[in-house]
Image: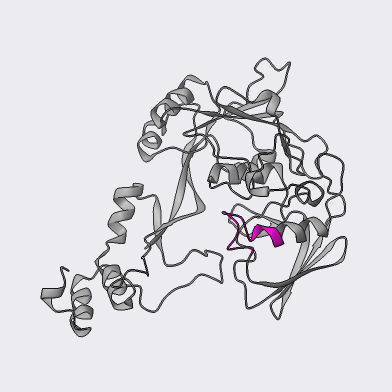
Amino acid sequence: MKNTRNRIVAGLLALLLMFSMTACGGGSSGDGGGEVIFNVATSGGYDTFNFFTTESSMVYDWLNITYDSLITYDEDYNAIPRVATDWTEEDNVWTFHLRDDVYFSDGEQLTSADVKWTYENAIDSYMYSLHASGFVSIECPDDFTVVFTCENAKPDMLYQIISILPEHIWSGVEDVFNYEPNEVIGSGPFIYSPERSGNGSIAFVKNADYWGDVPVIDVLVFTEYDNYDAIAQALKLGEVDAAYSLEKTQLDSLSGTPGIEAGAYGSFDFEYMGYNLLDELCADKTIRHAIDYCVDKELAVEMSYGGLAEVAYGAVSNEGFIYTPAEKRDLDIAKANELLDNAGYGKSKRTV
């Protein structure tokens, strides 16, 4: 079972559209001398800012505002240009053409060599390895063209945003897996500010030299709170402008509150039930199929996600690539028993 989830937010409707986003009251000036400071409450801390080792979805979003990527998404999750101006696919060969006006925060220009280095090394990362796999070669015929030759059809080519790292920085790191960058050299609309971070908060300042739409927010601050109730209270008191995520209980309590916009938006998040194929029983496909028929997916959506999720049958949700199996194996206990009986698992050998 896999569930794509709707992330619950209050005031913050799409973190990746932060470039032009305004706050629930337009943000606050704080003590920044007229700066527009946007405060976001989070329900937990982060593990690392390291592209290769982070397991945090929140850091994934942070990387997406401090680095650029080939593509981004519109409000309907359709892939649209970012650093790549356009792309084509023919016979499992993807060709991306890049902008020639993108620069990292240290002044170095972003080129196809940075894309090639990132994708070739992302295969060793925790979060991006799957989507950086399946390439026969990655070539750079010029500074602003990247050609990916894939082993087979690659339907996830436009599925995940992969931050483009500066080769001139990361290729010189002796051990990328144990590297914790104090200064994040990226080309995105925000720049990580260690000077303004601390005491449970992580701060980003706008990149005034960004090639695209420069953010209207001067300082973006993420502050950790102990629990979701504390976050809801902070929103009501005006201590923060938005929440990175909330639970269904807080969504209900905030809905209708004057000055607060609370709602849910679709995301690429998914959770799944996996099987240990090293186990003798689970290695038998019949057993796995029988278990599938015993899982009430709709009930799981209702009880675990407050109804704010949908049943899915694969991790890829791009239109045109969605996997729809002929046999969906939804709840059917009688079918599970039939499968086990036909496979020779008598009642004495099973508990279904």
Figure quadrant of the N terminus:
bottom left
> What range is drawn magenta here?
119-132
Q: Residue at x 63, y 50 (%)?
A: 52
Direction from residue 192 to residue 280 in the image, left or right: left
Q: Residue at x 57, y 54 (%)?
A: 127
Direction from residue 112 to residue 15 in the image, left or right: left
Colour scheme of the rendered structure: one colour
Q: Residue furthest left?
A: 348
In the rendered image, which quarter is residue 330 located in? bottom left
Q: Residue furthest front?
A: 174
Foreground pick, 52 / 328: 52
Direction from residue 35 to residue 234 in the image, left or right: left
Q: Position of residue 21 (x, y in %)?
A: 65, 37
Foreground pick, 11 / 149: 149
Magenta highlight: main SS: loop
Reply above or below: 192 against 312.
above
Q: Position of residue 111 (x, y in %)?
A: 84, 55
Q: Is residue 104 magenta?
A: no
Figure quadrant of the C terminus:
bottom left
Q: Position of residue 7 (x, y in %)?
A: 47, 46
- The answer to whether residue 175 is visible is yes
In the rendered image, which quarter is residue 89 located in? bottom right
Direction from residue 287 to residue 19 in the image, left or right: right
Reply above or below: 351 against 126.
below
